[in-house]
Amino acid sequence: MGKLIVHQDKVTDINAMISICPFNALEEKDGKLEVNAGCKLCKLCVKKGQPGAMEYVEEEVKTVDKSLWNGITVYVDHVNGEIHPVTFELLGKAGELAKKINHPVYAIFIGSGIEKKAEELLHYGVDKVFVVDAPELKEFQMESYTAAFEAFVNEIKPSAILVGATPVGRQLAPRVASRFNTGLTADCTILDIHENTDLVQIRPAFGGNIMAEILTPNSRPQLATVRYKIMDAPERSAEAKGEIVKISVPAEKLKTRTQVLGITQKQKEKSIENADILVVAGRGLKKKEDLDLVRELADALGGDIACTRPLAEAGWLDAKHQIGLSGRTVRPRLIITCGVSGAIQFVAGMNNSDNIFAINTDPNASIFKVANYAVIGDIYEVIPKLIEQVKQGKGVKA
Amino acid sequence: MEILVCIKQVPGSNKVEVDPVTGVLKRNGADSKMNPYDLYALECGLKLKEQYGGRVSVITMGPPQAQAIIKEAYAMGADAGAIVSDRAFGGADVLATAHTLAQGIKKFGKFDIILCGLQTTDGDTAQVGPEVSEQLDIPCVCNVKEIKGVEGDNILVDMEMAQDIEHLKVSFPCLITVQKDIVQPRLPSYLKKKDTEDREIVMYTLKDMEDQNKNNYGLNGSATQVQRIFPPTSDKVQVTWDDPADVLAEKIYSTIKSRKLLG
Ligand SMILES: Cc1cc2nc3c(=O)[nH]c(=O)nc-3n(C[C@H](O)[C@H](O)[C@H](O)COP(=O)(O)OP(=O)(O)OC[C@H]3O[C@@H](n4cnc5c(N)ncnc54)[C@H](O)[C@@H]3O)c2cc1C
Ligand SMILES: Cc1cc2nc3c(=O)[nH]c(=O)nc-3n(C[C@H](O)[C@H](O)[C@H](O)COP(=O)(O)OP(=O)(O)OC[C@H]3O[C@@H](n4cnc5c(N)ncnc54)[C@H](O)[C@@H]3O)c2cc1C
Ligand code: SF4
């Protein structure tokens, strides 16, 4: 917290100063150097500018008594009581963090007719599961869920709250954070905790091109959202530990200005966006029938088939299977591209995949720049052998 | 019907690099553009107006240069625009951004529907919409994949959830964040651009706001603090295999197996 002061007498070269600021926040006005609203207080001009020209002064900060806020809480994401697996992953993380600062682990479970389901959570190292169970909470509505959450925060005063970055979590968490005038860090990939209970939140921004480390040092509770499959879920313990505590919220607090008219199940089609394993067909395939080869490999690996745009355009596969800028963005744990050149429009849709294998005959194919495993070979020779290997490995006769 | 669309100016490309020594963002090229996700929100606003009548206004918080995206919105068909800009607003996180925008919105007018993009391409939090709705104390629905229509003082929307679609009726005033691809945004029109060249852009600074406490804005009003930024470290393997087909197949398989990647 602080502000920037310009000492005009120390400014020897205005244009040189202006060019330092990466945010175009420095400008000249009537021969004077001025800071405009674009300033991000990155302090680069202080460090790199003409000596003494820019000064950064700390301002008084509001503080909070952190010792009054206790416990690492996980929001239980669910649909009709079916708990989303991100919840267990977060409980694992919450356990680690809580241990470091000697705090309890809590879960907050909001819904209707969920009390029985809460018992499952007791197998994942939670000290207390707080349950807000009311008929008004049957479907997710932002206002009623926020009211329930608010009651929990007011009563328990947790130090930190971890929320799965699901469609519900991503809209509920900001509304709650705003109600308590506190910070929320989006899509954290790494979480740690300081001794003073400040949560260290690390997240990607700018489409993953940079990482930012973020603290919420002067307010409580601290909120963070975390995507599914980032943290590791702990083993389910056989015995149940911890207790279930009910929190009741007066019905009039659960009123909303939205009305749920109905719910439609989404078509349960397997989408490549959620796939863990993908085998991608490119124009290296000579004819449509050869897709069977790629499909067989996908089946053997327990994955799905995807393709580049030319194949979708030719009608070999439905557009739903197309990866890329004008197709789907995928992030599987394993992706094997077969005869794909690696055009940037394709790569944009898959470069965040965890393990990229690329099979291509051309050693200079651009796909090899993003591949973790660049396999220089002919798909018509490699794939059949690979299918054989996989099947043998599974004990199935090839 | 009064419709407001929140739009943000973002860097032209998100290919940023971090200076490893200073830890400061290096932006390649100073060009900037309207957040692509906001084009969908704006298009939804324009469509609603075409269907039900009314006005479409836009608002942005940012440096004075951000007026450029208001002009762009005019060229697409927006009727009025405001920019919320002040040195005191710099360095804002979502909390402070939402507070500032909410203050600006209150000043700007009374709106039935406020539309936001799902997220931005720079900060990328998707949090500003719901936080603004809280500051204004109005209902909010995010992740909207379809706007079904307007019925009296309500809007009917489909919200996409993990496994299903929730059909909601939301009473005015309300805030809605729309998904990418909900509609196809129109292109700016040259004629409209010419026509709106001199159209006013309202400017609000701190002194126009109802809340005059400087500590609720900008860096001071931010609850989160970026401690440092750094390039993503990659522990990624990069190997090249150039062997006969059976050796390649064997290498692929054993790697997949040892890395526990099998389904
Ligand atoms: C605006 C725009 C948006 C686009 N969006 C997308 C998108 O969303 N998704 C997308 O995929 N594309 C998209 N494209 C198209 C993109 O630019 C490429 O044209 C496309 O990705 C190429 O597909 P490909 O790799 O299958 O084919 P090619 O580029 O033709 O590559 C075929 C590759 O197969 C290799 N090969 C040939 N025979 C064999 C063999 N026997 N064994 C092994 N390898 C072999 C070749 O060496 C070559 O590298 C877009 C383009 C534009 C302009
Ligand atoms: C690397 C980095 C990481 C960051 N991480 C966090 C974080 O975790 N938590 C946090 O609180 N802040 C964070 N910030 C700050 C945050 O990006 C800014 O506060 C920004 O003002 C708002 O967020 P956004 O870009 O994520 O917008 P989003 O919430 O993604 O935007 C959603 C929609 O809100 C509207 N909108 C957003 N900004 C404006 C605006 N200025 N004017 C008009 N409409 C707007 C648009 O309709 C937009 O489509 C981070 C900033 C950086 C540089
Ligand atoms: S602190 Fe950073 S953003 Fe602000 S004027 Fe200096 S260089 Fe520019």
Image (cartoon, coloured by chain):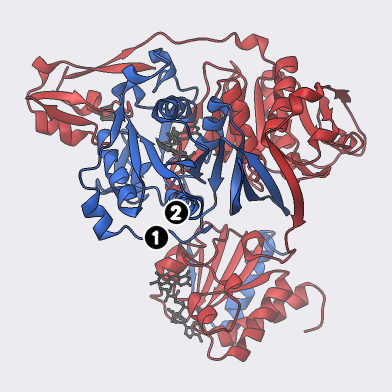
Chain colours: A red, B blue
Q: Is residue A64 left or right of residue B213?
A: right
Q: Is residue A301 left or right of residue B23?
A: right
The foreground one among A8 and A94 is A8
State the CA–CA distance, disc 2 to disc 1. Answer: 7 Å
Q: Is residue A89 visible?
A: no
Residue at image mark 1: B186
Callout 1: chain: B
**Disc 2 marks which amino acid?**
Glu
| CB-based contact (under 8 Å), mark 2 and mark 1 | yes
The foreground one among A107 and A251 is A251
Q: Which mark is residue B43?
A: 2
Q: Can you say which quadrant of the picture contains the N terminus of chain A?
A: top left
Q: What residue is shown at x 57% (from left), y 41% (from top)?
A: A189
Judge the density around disc 1: few (<14), some (14-19), many (≥20) Cα neighbours within 10 Å: few
Image quarter where ligand 1 lies:
bottom left
The foreground one among A134 and A292 is A134
Q: Callout 1: helix, strand or loop?
A: loop
| Earlier sequence position, callout 2 versus callout 1 | 2
Q: What residue is shown at x 38% (from left), y 75% (from top)?
A: A364
Q: Is residue B224 above or below residue A271?
A: above
The foreground one among A64 and B72 is B72
